[in-house]
Amino acid sequence: MCKCRFAGQSEWLRPDSRGRFSYDFMSTPDTQIEEVDLSGTLINHNGLENLVNQNKLQTLSLPGCPEVDDWFLARLHVFGESLLELDLSHCSRITVGGLTALQNLRKLKRLDISGLPQLQNPGLVWILLEEILPHCRVTGAEYEQGLIQPDSQEQTEDHHEASTHTGLRHL
Amino acid sequence: MWRKLFTSVPAFRALKAPCRSFSSSSRGAEKDFFKDLDTHLRAFRDKAAAAMPGSDWSPIELTPGLPPERADVVIVGGGVVGWSIAYWLKMKARVRDGLRVLVVEKDPTYSQASTVLSCGGIRQQFSLKENILLSLFSAHFMKNINNHLWVVNEDPVDLQFNHSGYLFLASEKSAHIMEENYRTQRYVGAKVALLSPSQLKERFPWMNTEGVALASLGLENEGWFDPWSLLNALRRKAVSMGVYQCFGEVTGFKCAANLAETTDGEVLNVQRIKYVHVRMPNSLEYQPVECAVVVNAAGANSGKIASMLGIGLGPKESVSGVPLPVEPRKRFVYVVHCPDGPGLDTPFLIDYSGVYCRREGLGGNYITGMSPEETEEPDISNLDVDHEFFQEKVWHRLAHRIPAFEQLKVSSAWAGFYDYNTFDQNGIIGLHPLVPNMYFATGFSGHGLQQSPAVGLAVAELILDGGYKTIDLSAFDLKRILLQEPIQESNIV
């Protein structure tokens, strides 16, 4: 169910129980949208055409959108000056190739990449993303994800070192 | 009568094992034919069924893999351009079996094919609007690739596209060219941004911006992908639509010659191709394929195909004396490993010194190379790699631009051919006046892969509709070679 919040307002504009929107926003046609929540919708890179003019967009939530893919992420560069939060959890089509396009979102503060099945090394991708996005906190991937786990007898001090070593070899 | 029937059974067994002698097997059959009566009868029945029409077996031995005896369009060259043309021809034909298309490829292993040896990059940062449009169309094609190339019951196509963009660096003297190109690119619809040296340093802290006056970064539809996946996807879809694939080499043509007189009074020998001779691999046997149209998409070998028709072999001042200016040029690609190198934000970096570099995977590997000087072109008789070239020419330029690359190790390298257009390094598409039914789609000089989906559509429109419908590529027509009017890319490299 999608909803959005305009600049200067604190309430969300969402469809009511009958699926209809109120038309209050038509009275102020020049307000920009600040937050958009598109969780679970079928939005794809063509659908972004509707949003590209919103250059004050700060938050984009896309958890569980099955049609959001790498080409969608490549189109997000238009929000490079304004986007602060991006939630991409459980979007099954996203791969590392699309996440590199996020380098254009220089103001990003929070990025959620949990539950992306096509990432073979979520821990490594987490480190690399934090490197390229200077102000961003990336959530959703843990350091150990994607590393080959040693068996339980080797739980010594050099467990940390051993797992890093095998992790890099695993690439 | 029974004895005659059972003595003929070992004859059938002898068909499967011809080295066994007649008499010993017949003695064996007589000795225990009561025991094996059942198997003998069954073998007899099977062989009789196979000899009937409607089965695979035939007493006439046919060479496997021969092309059909006639086809409407024969595409010489099974690289990405050739298969793209085949796919679009079938897409536009709409009716199954409405058009018989044959793709002839010399090497089933694709060991020297430019397509699979390519770095796989795609960019819109050109100066000619035709090049920008071609590559934009191809990017849109790849965006929706499964709408175009998915085959029922097969896996969806995955190109492994990395959306990292291209980054061109310009020095003081070429900054104005970059600004002009930026305006053309924006006008045509490419999403590019210009960066100053300080913005560049802030964005890519691992780069040494000394000497850089301006940089141009592709924001969308640029990056690199896996060329083999694209080739296989096009091939799989085209074959599913009924395109014939033949592995063989085109060794000659049989043409009908006519004499035509030009306005200057010069008499030209115009040849219309009637048959294409396709020779089978490792054999002298060839099949003449009767055809209406031939497409020359042979890449680095297109010049050789053109010379089989006498193009370039005539007297110097006449039309037939101008050869097709496409020849193979060897280019090296080196894979280097640098653990402290730039990270996920590495674009496909192209420096004004000519060196290029892109990230490969997530493990600190990079692919790099450089175009050699005109005077120092490497030998094209083989695909051996010259490692000295990296040590002497590439490394120091690379390390100057990215200081982390002072410590690196070359893991491997390969070489591939460009179908280099020596005239103006842009594609050659269209008909030759001396051969009214051969369409050329070659000479892309390193850009063939990224322009292939769009070029395929353009050539299919030329063949089936008689003119360009989607992108107007009349600027790339072959006539410019004969009129000596080059169109140059004013790129900074």
Image (cartoon, coloured by chain):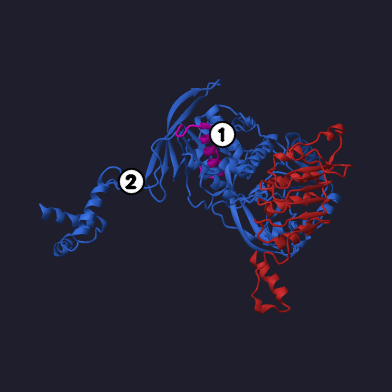
* Residue pointed to by mark 1: B459
At x 65% / y 76%, what residue is drawn?
A152
Q: Chain letter for blue? A: B
Q: Secondary structure at mark 2?
A: loop
Judging from the image, what secondary structure is the residue with disc 1 in?
A: helix
Residue B359 coordinates in the image, percent (x, y): 70, 56
Q: Main secondary structure of the magenta part?
A: helix
Instruction: Tell me if residue B16 can be seen.
Output: yes
A107 or B444, which is in the foreground?
A: A107
Q: Residues within 10 Å of mark 1 (few under 14, many from 20)?
A: many
Q: Is residue B306 above or below residue B154?
A: above
Measured as percent of width and height from the top left, residue B280 is found at 40, 47
- Chain A's colour is red
Of all chains, the one bearing label 2 is B
Q: Amino acid at mark 2?
A: Leu
Instruction: Please name whichever residue, B327 or B58, is drawn nearer the observer in this view of the structure.
Output: B58
Query: Considering the image in quadrants, where does the N terminus of chain A appear?
Result: top right
Task: Single out the residue that lies furthest toward the left.
Answer: B1
Q: Which residues are magenta?
A: B77-98
Q: Chain of mark 1?
A: B
From the viewer's perspective, is residue A145 above or below residue B358? below
Q: To which residue does mark 2 refer?
A: B62
Residue contact between numbered discs 1 and 2, judged by CB atoms under 8 Å: no
Q: Would residue A91 be counted in the magenta stretch?
A: no
Q: Quadrant of residue A170?
A: bottom right
Q: Position of residue A67 (x, y in %)?
A: 66, 46
The x, y position of residue B82, in whole percent, is 53, 41
Distance between the alpha carbons at the discs numbered 1 and 2: 34 Å
Residue B64 is left or right of residue A92, and the answer is left
Q: Nearer the viewer, residue B178 or B284?
A: B178
